[in-house]
Image (cartoon, helix red, strand yellow):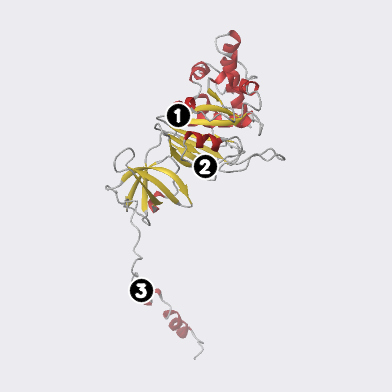
Amino acid sequence: MSWLTDDEDDDEEYSEFDESSVKVRPNPKGSRPRTKTRPEHSDAVTGRVLAIDRGRYLVLLGEGTDDEHELTAARARELGRNAIATGDRVDVVGDVSGAEGSLARIVRIQARTTLLRRSADDTDEVERVIVANADQMLIVVAAANPEPRARLVDRYLVAAFDAGVRPLLCLTKTDLADPEPFLKNFAGLGVTVFRRRADDPDVTELRRELEGVTTVAVGHSGVGKSTLVNALVPSAHRATGVVNVVTGRGRHTSSSTVSLRLPGGGWIIDTPGIRSFGLGHVQPENLLRGFTDLAAVAEDCPRGCTHLPDAPDCELNEAAARGDLNPDRVDSLQRLLITLAG
């Protein structure tokens, strides 16, 4: 080894590391730059997502035809971070036979008619998709054991109106307590209400309201939602539980969201019981759209009006005072706006 001591030797040293003398290895196999061109998947078939389990999607193909069958699918890379929800209509490619051990790929999500969402809490604007393409929301509440929570029902209603989904209210265990005082909280909304005793197996009236459409069932743990779903769909076999006599809370029995076909047509989507429902993603103007009669009057309100009881020159408050609007209906809207405001 010789140590460099003069400028000439320095030039010689640096020439050893000149970039022009570096050999460039050709791209190894498979390292070609990715193209932005994506396949059109013209051979894709459309199906309904029935359930989701650890990155696998149960999809129904050929709904209502002689070739109706289920298959398991994974999400394709080209979907990016777009979330797939139960109830989504999706395009599937690959092995769509549904044979045991086969795995298809979901390459597209069809346009959604509705999207029911919630956030972790009211300060979190990141939305969690619950179900897609639901027509109705069946809010299941127990008259007692556990005690009904009007504020939680308010939150369900806000989410339903925001999503453009028709809300229904089902009071269970009405043999344990009179549900009417609780129902007065929602008198101005015009929501269809069903009352059920714990020992009543007849669901004819409720099933008639659900036939032919897609309904998502939501409710606090322990209110009897899974029991109700089993009555509506005898083949469902959804796990049921009891309410803890010490805490007054129900045990989570439904651990996943799943679509079940009703005997007379239509779908009921059962969701896990929850104890909180964040609304950080909902905008007040979206809520007002759910009250079409009030929205028309609110157009005459001052710019930036909150529509709350203390809002100055609010046309809703003035119309209710004149008798031009149902005061209960205005009060119901204001309750939901206050709920949304936290």
How far apart, in angstroms, are the residues tagged by discs 1 and 3? 66 Å
Residue 237, given in percent of the width and then of the height, sits at: 50, 42
- Seen from the viewer's position, the closer of residues 248 and 117 is 248
Q: Secondary structure at mark 3?
A: loop
How far apart, in angstroms, are the residues tagged by discs 3 and 2? 60 Å
- Seen from the viewer's position, the closer of residues 306 and 130 is 130
In the displayed structure image, the side of residue 136 where residue 170 appears, left or right? right
Residue extending farthest to the right is 246
Residue behind mark 1: 210
Residue 176, given in percent of the width and then of the height, sits at: 65, 28
- Name the amino acid type tagged 3: Arg
Count neighbours of disc 3 (C-alpha within 10 A) and say few if under 14, some if 14 to 19, many if 20 or more: few
Count neighbours of disc 1 (C-alpha within 10 A) and say few if under 14, some if 14 to 19, many if 20 or more: many
Count of numbered circles in the view: 3
- Seen at 42% across and 81% down, the residue is 16
Rendered view: 153 above or below 51: above
Q: Earlier in the sequence, mark 2 or mark 1?
A: 1
Residue 222, given in percent of the width and then of the height, sits at: 61, 37
In the displayed structure image, the side of residue 65 where residue 83 appears, left or right? right
Residue 64 sits in which quadrant?
Answer: top left
Quadrant in the picture for the C terminus: top right
Closer to the eye: label 1 or 3: 1
Q: Secondary structure at mark 1?
A: helix
Rendered view: 250 above or below 325: below
Residue behind mark 3: 25
Give residue 299's mark.
none
Residue behind mark 2: 238
How far apart, in angstroms, are the residues tagged by discs 2 and 1? 18 Å
Q: Earlier in the sequence, mark 3 or mark 2?
A: 3
